[in-house]
Image: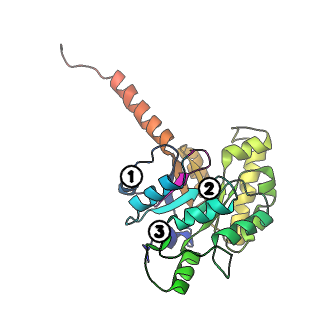
Amino acid sequence: MGLNYTFLRNLESKELITGIMIFEFFNLGLPKILKECGADFVIYDTEHSGVGIETIKMMVAAGRELDLYPIVRVPSLDQNSISQYLDAGVKGIMVPNVKSAKEAKQIVKLAKYRPIGERGIAFNVAHDHYSPDDPEKKIREANSSNIVIAMIESKEGVENCEEILSVEGIDMGWLGHFDLTDSLGVLGNFQHELFTESVEKVSKAGKITNKPLGFLDINQSMLLQFRKLGFSVLGYGHEVLVFQKAFKDGIEMMKHLKTGGNM
């Protein structure tokens, strides 16, 4: 059932996995465009974008035959948002601002089937490609291929990051750097020692628990820094930033063109 995603093959070995987050461009051609660019995953944001389940369901369907692992960042730790997005065919669930092992266990309870969690049962729907296969087989495959990502993006989350990542069923930690600097009282200052110390603690927790870590930015030096720290899942910003950067560079290039003769 489904594809043998490069994302899943490389996750455990911590080989580099690359992708992007989507805030605005929810176009049905987008998954194919991303795959042609070499992306392994896409994160569809529903925390800040305002889009709902119908939009996400169409985006996942548009990319169903592609080796492009679809993840949704849900608005919050909420049963409806987690279970409904999974039933709609999303493979990965990213939950913002996880602060404790208790919260992490609740996420797993909602996102994984028994015996790991208590996810509600719905078969022959989008998540199992409407197939009539054996239900027990579907449960095993879903529990192994649907990953749960805990975003660590607060002072409290950093303090408890090792305990969070140790929870069975939490498959990855993701460092939310802007929110973390805000929580630390140093908004946007990624050179501040409070931030760098927090990053080091999360990096260490990933190594201790043997859980992969993710990070997203458009700044290449920051991406290199986090890769050196052992972060193996890297996103190249979100699509608005990427479009703005490329388009601005193109505009500036055209403004400096020199004509070779009279028009």
Identify the residue at image location x=80%, y=66%: 102
Residue designated by label 2: 74
Q: Quadrant of residue 254?
A: top left
Question: 198 above or below 190?
Answer: below
Tell me, yes or no, whether the two marked residues, 2 and 3, touch with CB atoms within 8 Å.
no
Residue designated by label 3: 126
Identify the residue at image location x=72%, y=59%: 202
Magenta span main SS: loop
Question: 2 above or below 58?
Answer: below
The kind of residue tagged 3 is: Ala
Residue designated by label 1: 28
Q: Residues within 10 Å of mark 1 (few under 14, many from 20)?
A: some
* Image coloring type: rainbow
1 vs 3, front mark: 3
Identify the residue at image location x=66%, y=50%: 176
The kind of residue tagged 2 is: Val
Q: Is residue 46 magenta?
A: yes
3D distance between C-alphas at marks 2 and 1: 20 Å
